[in-house]
Image (cartoon, helix red, strand yellow):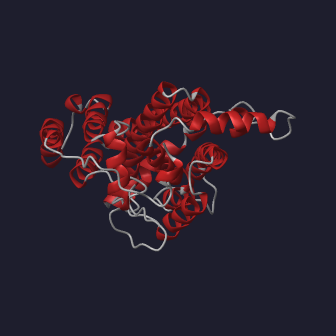
Amino acid sequence: MSIKNIRLEVMQFLEKNVDSFVDQYLIPVEKIWQPTDFLPNSQSDTFFDEVKELREIAKELPYDFWVTLVGDTITEEALPTYESWLMDVEGIDNVERNGWSKWIRQWTGEENRHGDLLNKYLYLSGRVNMREVEMTTQHLINDGFDIGTGRDPYKNFVYTSFQELATYVSHNRVAQMAKKYGDNKLSKMCKMIAGDEMRHHHAYSEFVTRIFQVDPSEMMLAFQYMMKAKIVMPAHFLRESGEKISTAFEQFSDSAQRIGVYTAADYVDIMQKLIEKWEIDKITGLTDEAEKARDYLMKLPARMARISERLVIPQESHIFKWVEPALIR
């Protein structure tokens, strides 16, 4: 049987449990928080007072913080790209509306709230150029992305396991920083988003755990492939209006690293966490090729840590069209 057919067989085997995955890792619409729960109430007589308070507190947040928050928002707002990519993965059938496509739709429904919440906060804050933000978001959706997984479910689940944990780290750190600067409401918003991301990480990493149980060698090779190729972020094609895809993501990443929101050390830490979570050192029944892949993976975090220590981050902030320095103290 071909590798592709084996993967399809494994996906069909796991699909029998999709309803239990939905029940365990996703929250019913009527019970989960909605963006309106954390924003000024537009139906209330106190709406303008609440907006004024939000804008006053927002004045205390520094430049790199705003760049990072805008970049995180744009990443969340490019959700149509991520859903369409995942719907095309082998074993996920939206035409027949199989169990996996049900998972993707409901996961998308939860993720969609994140961009809604952050976008409205940015709009009300008065601190950013929303038209520039909106154009960057549209460019990012237009340009799509290539995360190096192809249609392979094993590689895609490695990617989503990693990426959901990375977004947890980023949103959680932004929450901590917002609290430090006295913006408790923004802190709560980002904390709630981070909680969703961690829950989704647990789901995708559980899918990988299940695959390791039934197809350990191929899952090991897929994990090695993704770590060797390096995980690219969903917004790696980020660009500003009038620009081509070039260095905008790198400059956004520099801002996030400068203030400690998401760093090269975090990347290494997430890799190590996945190795431990999937108990890579204990998996048995591997082919010779998969054994070599395991050896590579076990040594990789230490190698990457040494490289990350030598990285030099520019001290000067790149000035983005999204965030005008004149608006920021």
Q: Residue at x 21, y 51 (%)?
A: 228
Q: Is residue 257 above or below residue 2?
A: above
Q: Is residue 13 left or right of residue 291?
A: right
What is the quadrant of the N terminus in the image?
Answer: bottom left
Q: Is residue 111 left or right of residue 13?
A: right
Relative depth, front residue between 212 and 254: 254
Q: Is residue 262 left or right of residue 96?
A: left
Relative depth, front residue between 97 and 258: 258
Q: Position of residue 243 (x, y in %)?
A: 42, 72
Q: Is residue 304 above or below residue 182?
A: below
Q: Is residue 299 left or right of residue 315?
A: left
Q: Is residue 82 above or below residue 296?
A: below
Residue 284 sits in quarter: top left
Q: Position of residue 150 (x, y in %)?
A: 37, 62
Q: Position of residue 89 (x, y in %)?
A: 46, 59
Q: Residue at x 66, y 36 (%)?
A: 54
Q: Residue at x 45, y 35 (%)?
A: 168
Relative depth, front residue between 129 and 145: 129
Q: Residue at x 32, y 58 (%)?
A: 3
Q: Count of labels shown? A: 0
Q: Position of residue 158 (x, y in %)?
A: 36, 46
Relative depth, front residue between 270 and 51: 51
**Residue 39 visible in rendering:** no
Q: Is residue 53 above or below residue 311?
A: above
**Residue 214 visible in rendering:** yes
